[in-house]
């Protein structure tokens, strides 16, 4: 199984990241029949306020450990063949990709379910702190994530 878990300040280019991951890790791998992906981008509106930019902070060792635990849990629940999980930190602007989750499996049910689990677990368990700068000139820390419904 190939997996890559990465937290970075550089801009995410999801489709290039997926292509690079496959090129680097999939030589002679023909056992997957499904790929599920999720790309999360920054919205310009949150809790009724216009957001100009956001700063995402994290504590590297804690965040990476939690992300690995989330991936390990997904691998226990579904027969995942490959996992790519990338998350941005630092200054982020509206429409910038923040998170990429890609999962490969032999069948679509495991790929869809594994991808959704990884994203929802990441949103609720991974220690990232978000500070929004609003159009009004105010700044605020985001206290809760949006529900995954």
Image (cartoon, grey):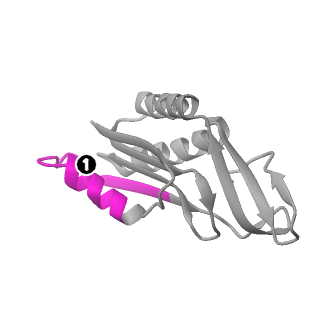
Q: Which residues are magenta?
A: 16-38
- Residue 41 quadrant: bottom right
Image quadrant where one finds the N terminus? top left
Q: Does residue 78 appear in the picture of this structure?
A: yes
Is residue 27 found inside the magenta-colored segment of the image? yes
Please state if 43 lies on the left or on the right of 16 as rendered: right
**Residue occupying image coordinates x 29% and y 52%:** 21
Pointer 1: what residue?
32
As displayed, is residue 70 above or below residue 110?
A: above
Secondary structure under tag 1 reads loop
Please state if 71 lies on the left or on the right of 40 as rendered: left
The x, y position of residue 113, in whole percent, is 48, 45
**Residue occupying image coordinates x 62% and y 62%:** 92
Q: Residue furthest left?
A: 28
- Residue 62 quadrant: top right
Image quadrant where one finds the C terminus? bottom right
**Residue occupying image coordinates x 35% and y 58%:** 17
As displayed, is residue 76 above or below residue 55?
A: above
The x, y position of residue 43, in whole percent, is 68, 67
Residue 138 or residue 142, whichever sits in front = 138
**Number of dots carrying numbers:** 1
Is residue 131 found inside the magenta-colored segment of the image? no
Q: Does residue 146 appear in the picture of this structure?
A: no
Residue 62 or residue 47, whichever sits in front = 62
The x, y position of residue 122, in whole percent, is 58, 41
Please state if 136 lies on the left or on the right of 142 as rendered: right
């Amino acid at each position: 199984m190939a997996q890559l878990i990465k937290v970075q300040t550089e801009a995410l280019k999801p489709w290039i990241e997926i292509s690079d991951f496959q090129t680097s890790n999939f030589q002679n791998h023909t056992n997957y029949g499904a790929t599920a992906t999720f790309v999360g981008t920054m919205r310009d509106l949150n809790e009724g306020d216009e957001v100009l930019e956001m700063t995402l902070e994290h504590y590297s060792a804690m965040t990476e450990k939690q992300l690995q635990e989330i991936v390990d849990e997904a691998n226990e629940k579904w027969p995942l063949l490959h996992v790519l999980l990338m998350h941005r930190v630092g200054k982020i602007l509206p429409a910038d990709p923040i998170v990429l989750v890609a999962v490969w499996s032999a069948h679509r049910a495991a790929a869809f379910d594994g991808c959704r689990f990884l994203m929802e677990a990441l949103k609720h368990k991974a220690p990232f702190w978000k500070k929004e700068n609003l159009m009004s000139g105010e700044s605020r820390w985001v206290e809760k994530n949006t529900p995954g419904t």
